[in-house]
Image: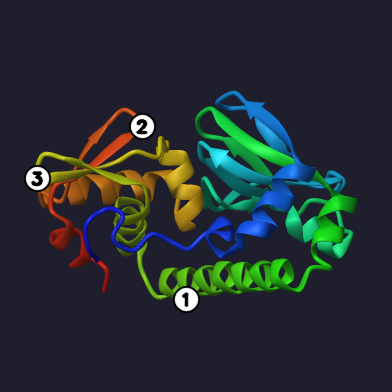
Amino acid sequence: MGQPGAALAITFLDLLSESDRLEFERRAGPRRFKRGSTLVNEGGPGSEVMLLTEGRVKVSITTAAGRDIVLGFMGPGELLGELAVIGDQPRSGTTEALEPVQALAISAADFRALLERPSFADAMLRSLVNRFGDADRRRIEFASLQALGRVATALAELAEQHGEPDGDAIAITLPLSQEELAAWTGSSREAVAKALASLRGLGAIRTERRRIVVLDLEALKRQIA
């Protein structure tokens, strides 16, 4: 795993042609959300699709037992709510702003009209393949790891996708709590706390309030086994 930004995920916006992007923007309207606000509610109607332009969000679901499970995080260039519109189904998860967010919102009808353009539909398909492929890979990795390995895997991914240089270290800029890290890795909060303590003891990370700094990425990766 390289330096931050070396292997950023390809977003939906990256896959769009210039003409498709301009047509999307022509049909869409701007939206702004404060940190902590909800962009989409689980079970709500699929009435629109949003393209994130600034800020990052958390996507989660609530199990029948009332437990929150974090499915992942999304940022600029990524689509939100397209599956509910394509499948004409209720929203499958809740999306919350982790920081101030700006987006372009397009109605379900206009989004379906854009899907009639072959180049737009191709970009949509490729985006979904990438997203579900990443999700499958993460599930397989997490299934074979204990809590320490899961947390180390998550932090290594966050350092790559949401990291900024901090001297010789990498500061993870995504503001996550231990509860959110636990919900993402399928671990208990206590197990996450112990894993973070172990990684601190190894000199791999430094923790601050809602902020983690990776001091030694190689030491972190050695725990993924």
Upstream in the sequence, badge 2 or badge 3?
3
Query: How many other residues sit within 10 Å of disc 2, few (<14), some (14-19) or many (≥20)?
Result: few
State which mark lies toward you, 3 or 1: 3
- The answer to whether residue 65 is seen in the rendering is no
Q: Tell me the residue that label 1 is attached to.
A: 140
Q: Position of residue 117 (x, y in %)?
A: 79, 68
Quarter placement of the N terminus: bottom left
Residue 135 falls in which quadrant of the image?
bottom right
Upstream in the sequence, badge 2 or badge 1?
1
Say if 225 sits above or below 111 in the image.
below
**Residue at point 64%, 68% (across, down):** 123
- What's the residue type where badge 3 is placed? Asp
Q: Position of residue 156 (x, y in %)?
A: 29, 58
- Label pair 2/1, CB-CB below 8 angstroms: no
Residue 222 falls in which quadrant of the image?
bottom left
Q: Tell me the residue that label 2 is attached to.
A: 210
- What's the residue type where badge 2 is placed? Arg
Residue 145 falls in which quadrant of the image?
bottom left
State which mark lies toward you, 2 or 3: 3
Quarter placement of the C terminus: bottom left
Q: Tell me the residue that label 3 is attached to.
A: 168
Please name whichever residue, 34 or 220, is drawn nearer the observer in this view of the structure.
34
Query: How many other residues sit within 10 Å of disc 1, few (<14), some (14-19) or many (≥20)?
Result: few
Tell me how the rendering is colored: rainbow
Please name whichever residue, 40 or 115, is drawn nearer the observer in this view of the structure.
115
Upstream in the sequence, badge 3 or badge 1?
1
Q: Position of residue 131 (x, y in %)?
A: 57, 66
- Number of numbered discs: 3
Secondary element under disc 1, as helix, strand or loop, is helix
Q: Position of residue 84 (x, y in %)?
A: 80, 57
